[in-house]
Amino acid sequence: MASTLSIIDLRKMQVSDLEKDLQEKKLAVAKTRLDIGMMSQKDTAIYKKEKKDIARMLTVINEKKGKTEDRLVTLGD
């Protein structure tokens, strides 16, 4: 599973691997949130980091699937 991979590392991965890691990360976030709620997890920053990892993965998946191509604006013209 991807643990705080950079955006460059994520872009090198295949979409199927990203989607698999995304599901694993979502489960980890749910568990972390539960642990924080039950006061068994002291470090609440982990939750925020995991959520940002999910956002990075979703960004790369959408880029690879071509969903953001039509929304890109070229600057400098």
Image (tube, rainbow, N blue to C red):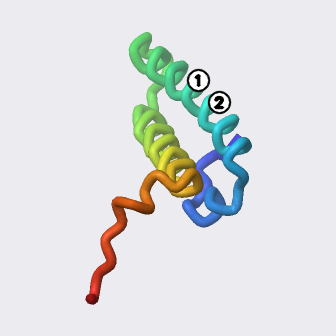
Q: Residue at x 43, y 11 (%)?
A: 38
- Category of crowding for the residue at label 1, using alpha-carbon neighbours closer than 10 angstroms: few (below 14), some (14–19), many (at least 20): few
Q: Which residue is mark 2?
A: 24
Q: SS at mark 2?
A: helix
- Residue type pointed to by label 2: Glu
- The image quarter in which residue 17 lies: top right
Q: Which residue is mark 1?
A: 27
Quadrant into which the C terminus falls: bottom left
Where is residue 16 shown, x and y percent of the image?
72, 42
- The image quarter in which residue 21 lies: top right
Residue situated in front as seen by the camera: 63 or 8: 63
Residue situated in front as seen by the camera: 29 or 21: 21
- Category of crowding for the residue at label 2, using alpha-carbon neighbours closer than 10 angstroms: few (below 14), some (14–19), many (at least 20): some
**CB under 8 Å between discs 1 and 2:** yes
Q: Residue at x 41, y 32 (%)?
A: 44
Q: CA distance from mark 1 to mark 2?
A: 5 Å
Where is residue 19 shown, x and y percent of the image?
64, 38
Quadrant into which the N terminus falls: top right
List the single residue furthest toward the front. 70
| Residue 71: mark | none
Q: Would you place residue 19 above or below residue 5 in this image?
A: above
Residue situated in front as seen by the camera: 48 or 53: 53
Q: SS at mark 1?
A: helix
Where is residue 25 shown, x and y percent of the image?
59, 33
Q: Would you place residue 69 above or below residue 32 in this image?
A: below
List the single residue furthest toward the bottom. 77
Where is residue 65 shown, x and y percent of the image?
57, 51
- Residue type pointed to by label 1: Leu
Q: Residue at x 29, y 81 (%)?
A: 75
